[in-house]
Each structure stands twice: as C-alpha cells, then as structure tokens.
Amino acid sequence: MPAEGEGYDVVVVANRLAVDRDGTDKDGHPRWKRSPGGLVTALEPVMQSQEGAWVGWPGSPGDAEDAVSEPFDWGGMHLVPVSLSAEEVQGFYEGFSNGTLWPLYHDVIVAPEYHRQWWEDYVAVNERFAAAAAEVAAEGAVVWVQDYQLQLVPAMLRAARPDLSIGFFNHIPFPPYEIFAQLPWRRQVLEGLLGADLLGFQRPGDAQNFLRACRRSLQLVPRQQAVEVPAADGGRRRVTARAFPISIDAAAMDELARSPEVRERARQIRADLGDPDTVVLGVDRLDYTKGIGHRIKAFAELLDDGLLRADETILVQVATPSRERVEQYRLLREDIELQVGRVNGAHGTLGHQVVQYLHHSYGREEMAALFQVADVMLVTSLRDGMNLVAKEYVAARHDERGALVLSEFTGAADELGQALHVNPHDIDGLKSAVVQAVVMGPREQRRRMRSLRRRVFEHDVQRWARDFLAALRPDVGADVGAEAV
Ligand code: ADP
Ligand code: F6P
C-alpha cells in the first residue's frame, strides 16, 4: 500500500494503456499512438475528467530495447505501464486472451485452443497487474478492472488490499454456460471475478449468463442479480452482476463532425472517390467476429444481381490491423484480401475500384469525415459486446442523414431500435437491408436518425461511467464526467 495520503483514489486497470508504443523520436523520446479498440475509445474521456491513474501494458514487450517502465502523463491522464516479456505477450495476450477466451466468449466462431502453458502465463500476468494496481491505489480507493484479459485480478487484488472497492467491467459478451463450461479453468475464472464488489456487463443476458455459470459451477444461488460469497472477516459478501451498456463521448464526436476542417475533408473524400451516388462504409478491427466477409459477400451479390451498380456505388472498408501474430487473424486477412480482389476483379474498371479496402488505422478527424461521407453504414458483427462504431456513426450525423445497417448480434442493437437490424448469416436478408438503406429517402433517414441520436446522446460514456461507479461507490460516481455533461 502507498504511504498515508499517497496514491490514487480512482485506478483503472486494463490490459492496454490508452497509448501504444510507436518507436522513438529523433531526440530519443518514446513516441506514442492511440491504442486500437473500443475500450480505449470509451475510457479515455472518462479518465481525462478524473484525477485517477490508468494501469496497463504499453503494447510492446518489456524486454524490448525501447521498453518504457516508468509512469508518465499523456493526454491529461496518468499512465502506469506494466511490462510483459515477449513470452508473456505470446502466452497471455496472443494465447490465452485471444486464442482461448476471445473465441470462447464470441460464440466459438473459431475453435478456442486450450493450452496449460497459456493459462500459467495468464495467471502470472494477472498477478502482475494486481500488484501494480495495489501499489498505486490509495487507502480505500476505487479500482476498476477492465475486460476478459484480467478476470483474475479482482480476487488477487482483494486478497492483497481488502480496503479497496473493486469493480470489473467486461467489454465483450459473457457466453452461455453450455459454451463457457468448455473452459478447463472455469472455476478459477469465476472465483477471480467474484473478488469484485460489482461486475458490469454489456447486456442483461451477459450478466445472467455469468450468474448461471456461478450457479452451475460453484453452486451459488443468485438472488436479485447478486450472489453471496465468503468474506475475509468470516462473514458474507454480496457480489452484484448487472448490465451497464457502454457508450461513446457523443458530444465530442458531434463537435468534431461539425468542425469546418472535418466537413471539408468529407467533401474531399467524396470527390476523391469519384463522387459516387452511394458510399457504403465498414469500419472495424480486422477481426473474425466483425462479419466483414459476410458483408463483402452480400455487396458482391448485389452487384452480380444488378441491384447495385458498380459505377454508382462504392464500398469503403477500413480494417484496422489487429492481433496480427495470432494465426486466425492472419488467415482472416488473407481471406478478406482475396475476397476484395475478386470483387474488384469482377466489377472494377480502370481507375475505379468498387471496394476500397484500407488496412490502416486513422485519426479521429478522418473517422468523423468518413462517417459523414457514408450514405450507408454497415455493422455486420457475428457477435460483438457493444460495437461503438455504430454509435460513432450516429453521433457524427448531425445532418440527420444516412442509414445504419446493424447486426442483431451486437450489444448496440438492444439500444438502437431505429437501425435496420440484420442477421448477418442470412445473406439474402442482409442484401435486402442494404438495398433498403441505399434507397431510403431523406424523410425516413431523418426520422430514424433523430431517434438514434437521442439514444446515443442521452446514454453517453460519461453516463455509463457515472452509473457504474455510483453503483459501486456512490461518493465517487457522482463526480464522473461532471463537466462534460
Ligand atoms: P472493438 O472494441 O471490438 O474494436 P468497437 O466498435 O467497440 O470494436 O470499437 C472500435 C473503436 O476503434 C472505435 O472507436 C472505432 O472508431 C475505432 N477504430 C476502428 N477502426 C479504426 C481505424 N481503422 N482507425 C482508427 N480507429 C478505428
Ligand atoms: O473491446 C474489446 C477489446 O478486446 C479490448 O479489450 C481491446 O482493447 C480492444 O478490443 C482491442 O484489442 P487489442 O487490445 O487486442 O488490440
């Protein structure tokens, strides 16, 4: 524990820091870029409005020559790096987190792999994160642990620091017991999570799945969204599991999208694309959960059927590089690039590619401009905890134009009732929804977009954090993002 009066009152612990190491500048200082993914998008504005610390991995192996191990400030946040060796990156991050848990928690879209060495690395790295959090948390602090990579941290932290209030939020789905039961270490994972006082999930169904797993695996009987577990003092402790759907900083996206620079950039992008009648957009990490192949297939068939014209329509697919050393991600990249090549081969002309595929990460301004260019936004995830891209699109459309096609297998679908909901496995249904979106008139676009925007602005990320922290510790929750509301 830090000395009396020292340490942070609010500590976030996440696998990733807000930034990823991006080499070294010419003066020998570390260069940083924003980390990919929805977790950072959501937590960054929350932590910028807090005096807290963010404990996480800086994205390159700790035994790398340019490793960073000292705390530093970035973008108004205090960041505390946790080092991982190259073997741990392989076993804990690429292995157990993304080769075992990620597919297991996403409907086993690809087969999860179970390796005892990966599990050992997962335990060791979770211990390191718990120790790092215990070191910076002030007496009686709130520690908020994030996501599936760190499910053992709550119990480890409670053992080391019983004075803390511990919350945990799972950014991805929690699977039905029939799937979760495959995990050889299912009891340990549940016991790890039960170290928290409050467990947050994206959807009510995820919280129910968790509570059912506690009943089936640990014989704990849930009552009123909670279970009771033995406490260190010999008594009982309540652990609550509830849905807290995550969101975005809607006001910030709206402001960015209204800026003259972004509007000008949107005009320029449209012109660069050859000013087509319809721009269809997909923005995702290149991940097999996102259904990118399904959407390209539907788009290609619409061109084949003559229901969309290749000279009037463009599909822009932005695919952020992700987890590139994991085998399934390498295979996915090959598949998608092959598919894009085929469609362009069949329907492209000299100087005009009907699918513009961009395997890059972009800044927020470019994203906001792309959202404004998109007449149709395609979100076709096969399974997705929330999908913040859907909410960003809505927040960027201050003109109340555009149409959102949204997979029913995203958390966002629960909230965004006025999107065109699709089952991405149903290619014919997906094609009909794309056509409906393409021909949708301005009145209907406006009616739907108004309702979508109301929801996203009323339930923004500041509210998500406030609701969670108020449920965990009312004295802390009340202040979160106060100036941003
Ligand atoms: P996930 O957390 O699975 O990646 P989300 O849709 O919830 O999915 O969040 C993705 C976040 O990453 C969004 O904020 C989105 O804008 C951002 N993002 C996705 N692709 C890119 C890209 N190519 N460049 C920059 N940001 C991106
Ligand atoms: O939102 C889910 C999530 O796995 C986050 O935990 C993570 O930060 C993000 O997607 C990006 O994944 P990664 O950190 O593996 O690049």
Image: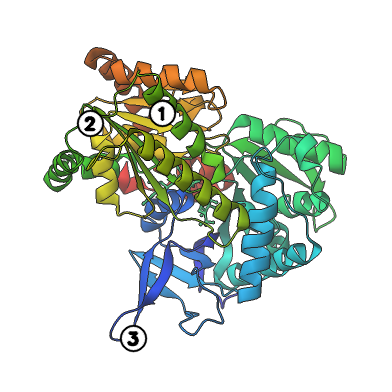
Q: How far is the residue under mark 2 from the one under mark 3?
A: 42 Å
Residue type marked 1: Phe
Q: In the picture shown, does residue 204 fall above or below 257?
A: above
* Quadrant position of the C terminus in the picture: top left
Residues 130 and 352: in front is 352
Total labels drawn? 3
Residues 408 and 331: in front is 331
Rendering coords of residue 406 (x, y %): 45, 27
Residue that label 1 marks: 299
Disc 1 is placed on an element classified as: helix
Q: How far is the residue under mark 1 from the one under mark 2?
A: 27 Å
Q: Residue at x 67, y 37 (%)?
A: 107
Residue that label 2 marks: 398
Q: Residues within 10 Å of mark 1 (few under 14, many from 20)?
A: many
Residue type marked 2: His
Residue that label 3 marks: 28
First in sequence: mark 1 vs mark 2: 1
Disc 3 is placed on an element classified as: loop
413 horizontally vs 242: left or right: left
| Residue 273, picture quadrant | top left
Q: How far is the residue under mark 1 from the one under mark 3?
A: 47 Å
First in sequence: mark 1 vs mark 3: 3
Residue type marked 3: Gly
First in sequence: mark 2 vs mark 3: 3
Q: Residue at x 19, y 43 (%)?
A: 269
207 horizontally vs 258: left or right: right
| Residue 33, picture quadrant | bottom left
Disc 2 is placed on an element classified as: loop
Q: Residues within 10 Å of mark 3 (few under 14, many from 20)?
A: few
